Amino acid sequence: MTSLDAAVEAAAMALAYAKRVSVFSGAGMSAESGINTFRDPEVGVWKNKIALYMFGTPFGWSWTPGWAWSAYRRFHGPIFAAQPNAGHIALATLPSRLGLPKDAVQIATQNVDYLHQRAGSPVETVFEVHGSVFRHRCIKRGHPIALPTDQPLPEHPPVCAQCGSKARPDAVLFTESLPADQWEGAERAMRALRRGDVLFVIGTSGQVQPAASLPDYTAAGVVKIEINAERSGHTNQMDIFVEGPSAVCLERIVQRAVELKQQQQQQLR
Ligand code: NAD
């Protein structure tokens, strides 16, 4: 048995016994859907530090909204084209496969790509602590601007019907605070876990605060399982570290947990 096999088995065992499961996900969760993470590859929008400053900060959006919009479109393109991967689907199908209530699985995500919900996780169980690139609002006053979600972004930034300022994503930019309702939901999802329940920390470097502090809100006795392609800022606080790609590993863990749960139930009969 390899160390990966052993970690998958340990994670599946914990999952088979859990009554509730919470998830804290980051950009690595969507890497196998073809969306670049922030820290890993030196490519595209992340490599061009000027473009990143222009579309990643409120200053960039207010000084050069046209430039910010075109850099943002390059970030948005792969997200728009992406499909949920096996990991998103494993989490969305976890309640039905393990015989848990639908709301027993709650997801706090730093991702802005809407892939958890597109995979089938109910919207009321997903908390987007960094917002979403499928919602927009105006730069000056924050008025909502509805754009079609089934089409790529237009070439030029749309204009607010109420105040005339240009559109920006309803996502958290560097230096901005997090949306209070989403943060409260995420914190509740962490605090809802009891001894023997499971927290998955998936594909996040642990570098972005305050989101990286979310796992600290879980109680003692919660089994903390990290899935990451490499060690992160969270690894030392975890009970189980599954070192590998999240889409492949999550499906393996969930499938094995289903088998273990069926075996438990047969023994009880
Ligand atoms: P990060 O880029 O800082 O770290 C990515 C982590 O994912 C790393 O620890 C890396 O080892 C791991 N990883 C890479 N590929 C993986 C895979 N296939 N399976 C498992 N793990 C993998 O990401 P972060 O911690 O989420 O912070 C970056 C910020 O940028 C977040 O706030 C996020 O909102 C934003 N962001 C979002 C998206 C998205 O919505 N998909 C994409 C890029 C950046």
Image (spheres, rainbow, N blue to C red):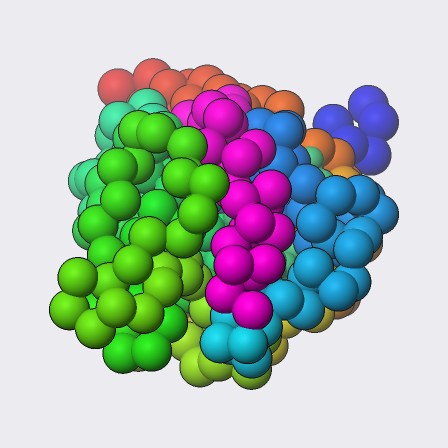
The x and y percentages for residue 216 are 53, 75
Q: Residue at x 75, y 64 (%)?
A: 50
* 120 vs 70, nearest the viewer: 70
Magenta segment's dominant SS is: helix
Looking at the rendering, which quadrant does residue 147 occupy?
top left
Residue 96 in sight in this render: yes
Q: In the image, 153: left or right of 19?
A: right
The x and y percentages for residue 148 are 26, 37
* 257 vs 254, nearest the viewer: 254
Q: In the image, 116: left or right of 30?
A: left
On whether residue 185 falls in the magenta region, the answer is no
Looking at the rendering, which quadrant does residue 102 occupy?
top left
The x and y percentages for residue 32 are 63, 29
* 48 vs 79, nearest the viewer: 48
Q: In the image, 43: left or right of 79?
A: right
Residue 196 in sight in this render: no
Q: Residue at x 84, y 27 (%)?
A: 2
* Quarter of the image where the N terminus is located: top right
The x and y percentages for residue 59 are 56, 79
Q: In the image, 202: left or right of 186?
A: right
Is residue 256 positioned above or below 240 on the image?
A: above
Is residue 126 positioned above or below 174 on the image?
A: above
* Quarter of the image where the C terminus is located: top left
Number of numbered discs present? 0
Q: Residue at x 40, y 61 (%)?
A: 168
On whether residue 73 falls in the magenta region, the answer is yes
Is residue 200 positioned above or below 186 on the image?
A: above
Q: Which residues are magenta?
A: 64-92
